[in-house]
Amino acid sequence: MTQERKIEFQRRLTQSNRSGVILIMYEIIFEYLDEALTENRDRETYKNSLRKAQEMIRELMYALDFQYPLSKSLASLYQYSNTRLSMSMYEHKPDKIIEVKKILTALYDSFAEAAKEDHSGPMMRNTQQVYTGMTYGKDNLAQNYVDGNIHRGFLA
């Protein structure tokens, strides 16, 4: 994943509510899976991309609240996906990655639909506000960061 994409995900995470964070985690997984599926990849990049996707899937598993019956089904799907990615890592065949991507895409679509109902505020407080489109760059929209609170972060 490029540094530019990492910064974009980081910026979006600071502005997102709970549902938005889950969606971003799925998007990060898709980014790593796409990276593993690229034609001009070496074996090490392939393995690293799959390992990072697995780490993100484990984070989704850790976030489950097992008070709800749906969590058990999601945990099973996440575990299955992790197993398939492990198999793909050692066989070096993309068919299992494509299968996992289909499963996770269906879950992503479901979470995206549920996120439309989530009107809570951002999870992170004391973050910079980001405004897009206030000014224009040569070839794209510029993003401005406004830091209204000079006491961001921890105070000792």
Image (spheres, grey):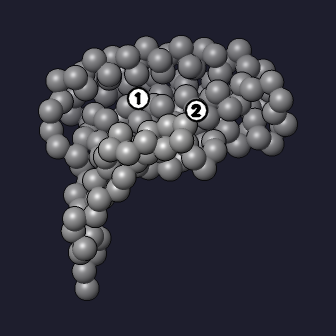
Q: Quadrant of residue 35?
A: top right
57, above or below 129, in the image = above
Residue 88 occupies quadrant = top right
Q: Position of residue 29 (x, y in %)?
A: 53, 33
Residue 66 appears left or right of 9 = left
Question: Relative to residue 103, is residue 70 drawn left or right?
Answer: left
The image shows residue 22, relative to residue 130, as above or below, that is above
Viewer-proximal residue, 25 or 87?
25
Please identify the quadrant where the C terminus is shown: bottom left
Residue that carries the numbered disc 2 in the rendered image? 31
Q: Which dot marks residue 75?
A: 1
Distance between the Cα atoms at labels 2 and 1?
Answer: 21 Å
Residue at coordinates 60% horizontally, 14% vertically from top-left? 99
* Secondary element type, mark 2: helix
Q: Is residue 59 visible?
A: no
The secondary element bearing badge 1 is classed as helix
Q: Residue at x 47, y 18 (%)?
A: 105
- Amino acid bearing label 2: Glu
- Residue at left offset 29%, top offset 70%: 153
Q: Position of residue 87 (x, y in %)?
A: 71, 27
Q: Give the number of the mark in front: 2 or 1.
A: 2
Foreground: 104 or 7?
A: 7
**Which quadrant of the rendered structure holds the N terminus?**
top right
Q: Are marks 2 and 1 in contact (CB under 8 Å)?
A: no
- Amino acid found under the numbered disc labelled 1: Ala
- Pick the residue in front: 27 or 87: 27
